[in-house]
Amino acid sequence: MKARDLALLALFGATAACGAEFDPPHELKTLRVLAVQKSAPYAKPGEKVDLAMLWHDGSKEAPRPVQVGWFAGCHNPPGDLYAGCFAEFAGAGPPGPGGLPPGIQFGLGDTFSFSVPDDIISSRPPPVDPKQPGYGLSFIFFAACAGKLGPPPKGEEVAFPVACYGPGEELLGADDFVAGYSTVYAFEGYRNQNAIITGFRVDGAEAQSNCIDGACVGTLPPTTLDCGTAPCIAACPDDGEDSCPEIPISPIVDPQSAEVDQISVDAYGKNYEEQMWIRYYVNRGGVKSDVRLLNDAQKGWNSDYGTKLYAPKKPGPMSIWAVVHDNRGGSAWVRQEVLVQ
Amino acid sequence: MLRSAARLPALSTTLLAGVVWVQAAAAQDEGSGAVPRGGSGAVVKPPPEEAAKKPVVVPPKLVRFENAPYPEAAQKAGIQGDVVLKLSIDAEGKVTAAEVTQPAGHGFDEAAQAAALKFEFEPATRDGKAIPAKILYKYSFTLKEAPAPSPGVAPPPPTAPTTGNLGGSLRIAGTNVPLAGAEVLVVFPDGGSRRITTDANGKWAIENLPPGKYRVKLKADGYQSQENDEDVVAGEAAEITYRLAPESEGFEVTVQGERPPREVTRRTLERREIARIPGTSGDALRSIQNLPGVARPPGLAGLLIVRGSAPQDTNTFVDGTLVPLIYHFGGLSSVIPTELLDRIDFYPGNFSARYGRVMGGIVDVGLRSPDTRCDGPYGKKTDKTGCYHGLAQVDLIDARMLAQGPIGPLRGWSFAVGARRSWVDAWVKPVLEESGAGVTTAPVYWDYQVIAENKPTHDSKISLRAYGADDRLEILIRDPLAADPILGGNITLRTGSHRVQALYTGQLSRDVDVSSMLSAGQNLIRFSLGNIKFDLDTYPVGARTEFGFKATRGFKLYAGYDFLVVPYDVLVRAPQPPREGEPDPGPYATRPVVETQESETAFRPAWYLEGEWTPARRVRVVPGFRVDYARDSGNADFSPRVNGRYDLVPSTDSPEDEASGKKRLRTTLKGGVGLFHQPPQPFETNPVFGTVELRSNRSVHYSLGVEQELSRHIELSVEGFYKDLTQLVSRDASGNGAFAYNNRGEGSVVGMETLLKYKPDARFFGWIAYTLSRSVRKNSPDDQEYLFEFDQTHNLIALGSYRLGRGWEFGSRFRLVSGPLTTPVLGPPALPSLYAADSGSYAQLQGEPNSRRLPLFHQLDLRVDKAWQFRDWRFSAYLDVYNVYNNQAVEALTYNYNYTQESYQTGLPIIPSLGIRGEF
């Protein structure tokens, strides 16, 4: 039982948590979407927002074609719940015989752009609490498919109105098809920046052979590396298990990335900051922590936000991803290449 | 008084033995079903000092003797005989019945019976008041040669008796169960003594004792000893019924079923039972979860799920004061230690009009009076008071102490002071820090209780209390939960509750009694998790008073008020909370927070009237009416209720049955119907989080059942119940990102509870409880019905505890319960989840709410106690093993990161809990 579980045990009165150990989320063994970055997590009405997706196909069949589709046009659903959008997307798919439902915008590729409606704030009732600023909310849905996107099979009860088909028109499942959503809030006078990542450290030293944010989009990890340009680590016979030597790794994140939540300050006089965390992923080996706290809304910056890498067994190149999230829709990432010897 | 008639042939009569049934004691007997009664609030198990007080009983005295004619045939045949009669004597001294219990035949029986019906007595008295009684009377028909009288000379008068008889019947207090094999030591006026043992019927007798005052000492294993002074009068046979209370081992608590006579069902747990139920570590409030109608909560959670209702639908009180947080950290242990509890009244439904504002159940905990009894050597109970007691106990979680006794300079006042503190923080902190968490405050709790009490008269009591509890922790989690990073960062939790309380109960006149309570205090909750915050401070003032008027014979009226004034300050910064039956909203980490801050005063007065009508001895009907007002929601709720009990077959102890010689086992029919209202939760009417204008939730309770005594010790109770739920608070998503709350929710609960109980005796207590139920809800009349999240179709509990002797006691509990419900994720070809890119985790795509039931739960718990009684103090230890055969009970489903794989999440493994205690 992890320390976190003990804390939750103490906090929530003990139901205990003993269950099977699944493959940890940091191991990329299937098609995975790692992050979606928005040029403006808080946008203004009428502003054009650019989105970029970071994905990786860890399947044994890789490399294979992966189709990425985007659906925009769901604004201010009831209760601000994503599920309220599904009715609008019913029958949606790549432009086909049925076309797209009115107001729905579709795009293919690792990047996508849409414009926030001018009336996204004015068209909805104001917040009940007059201290809260008026806002609007847009949901952008996406799907990454190791095949071709299409409408769901007729007669099947599904929630998400898009499906993914393989070369033989077979329906592909969650290992080869990832669907999801991202949100863009619209405010007249508030902004939210993505975190600023400037590099990566391996075993205490700043490393080369990495890409940050857009530089990683649409690129695959290299298949050859050398110790002159990339950090080198020794292979571990235990293949990424926690019995392997611990190699400290961490992105280099500018502490200025932790912004003050200005809405809390203006509306309630509360000096809260953004809550921020880092997710780690590897395509080989393992890491000690899937998620690390970067900034607490009340306690502030946690300088101990790195984790430990456990080297794989097989020599060769491997990749590490670190994705920084904030609780207001911002994200940033870095991909670091490492040579295992 | 003995009278003998001398005639030729001579005969003599002897008053053999009189059995005196004391009617007032029968009224306190909770085992008899016809007219169950109890003190205010409960069926009261008298504290030991009351059990020691005995009434002064004077047997009936014969003032007019009637000679029985000697049967002619027997006289001619020279036959003699003794006839033993059971005489029923009313409160005026008239013989109403004469039953032959030991016939002699030959016409003696009829002659003796006819003569005895013409006897006249001075009636028996109890504390100076004339009472009906029954006595045994031996009419001896003997033939002797009498000298022929001289003409004109009257025959000599019969010889005056010079000895009397002394005997009795020994029973268990509160019942009519005889105590066989008990020791009776009769100390004579001259210092001599004689020791005898009660027979299988609990009876004993010594004949031909010289007149005088005798001390009768009664002793039985497992029961409190008793000593009484009795008078032996020449020519009379005194037979008195004594009742011994079970011996308390330390402090005991009684959990009651619904409180007679104002509720439908009654389930009584003896004090000893609470402290010994395995798997509860002696926690009194946790023992309630073993009663029928109470669902098993997940893990160790301190939730009371009563007859298919939500936990927030059940309120817990301490002597009438509402206590919102009754468990430390949601379930570790109760905030009031068992040792300070006098009783727990539990009402699973159809409760009295004195309670309201909820539509589930009621738990009313009563604090005990300070113990000032004096113990003799080796813990033997005495009648003396004015002594001090102390206790110290340590187990795996906390340490506690308790001191009580008289307040020296204040005559008549007594005190109790208790305190408890957890020590789990001593070992949890290093464990958490070792695994990377920052610990500012390790989880710690403490509580305290102070009681001062006085009894100005024998029927009044003043009690002043102060009690409180505090839980706190602060931890920095540097590894947030991957499934939802909101569970990470700085976690702060602090809850506190403090009260001062004053109570008064008394008899204003012969027909009017009053109980009154006033309390004030503070509750606080501080919770923060990342950017989520919840700060609540309330300063509740409660006042409750009830008058009981004995309007006529057979009718008592109760009138009362129940006021609650709660000034509060609240700050909430959180996402909209989810509700059952709605789609999963996705990870909390990036959901927008809504904030509100306000200071207000909630005012909730209530008034009620209730009647207790007993048109006949076997019938009791309790109609009631309650009016509640909630200023915060603007609702006034009117709640009429009625319940009744009818003894189809009254108990053995009714005078009619005794007179006719029948032995009956009680059969009682019971039922009730009532309307119950529950105001919306505070956040539901908050202008930011909810909707201001909401009506109260509404429920109609129906119940019908039967109680059947199967033997003196075993009782079977079966009760069916149905609850119709309407006007339930529900909500629809609205266009401004919030939710519009309404009262369109509906639901129902139907079920049956069965309890087969062995009433505690010196060795054993136990029961088997089975509940079959179904609880459903709908978010609106047009929506589909779904099973309520805490629905448990089957709930079977079998438990018992047996005293092995020499201080050893062994107990076990087995539970077999339907598995918990869960809402499954969609299966292929549908995706089970969506990637929530803002948080980097996944949101479930769910199927029908609560549509999947996990495997059956079963578990065995064992407990062993050992006590060592020394001359001046007592040491005890217990081992309570939870989940003896380490069953991997499934509590929930756990999923991998994208919900494509699932696994069972099992509950607590085998956990031994060890405790030691010293007390004097």
Image: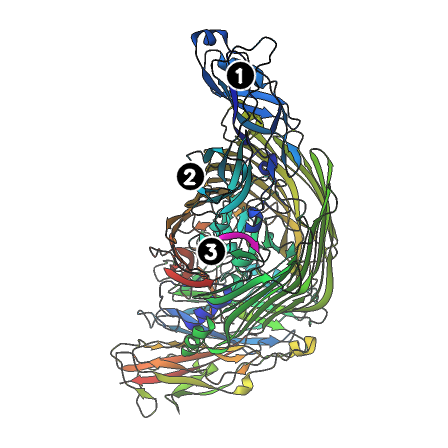
Q: Nearer the viewer, residue B831 or B141?
A: B141
Mark identifier at residue B379: 3
Place residue B58 in its image quadrant: top right
Q: Which residue is mark 1?
A: B112
User: How far apart in space, not on screen, are marks 1 and 3 (Cα)?
Assistant: 50 Å
Circles 1 and 2, Cβ within 8 Å, touching? The answer is no
Magenta residues? Answer: B381-386
Mark pair 1, 2: CA separation: 31 Å
Question: Relative to the observer, which residue lies in front, B442 or B715?
Answer: B715
Residue B196: give its label: 2
Instruction: Measure the alpha-carbon separation of dots 3 and 2.
Output: 23 Å
Packing grade of label 2 (10 A; few <14, some 14-19, many >=20) is some
Query: In the image, residue B359 lies at what x, y percent?
Result: 62, 48
Residue type at tag 3: Gly
Q: Is residue B403 above or below residue B822?
A: below
Answer yes or no: do the residues labelled 3 and 2 have beta carbons within 8 Å? no
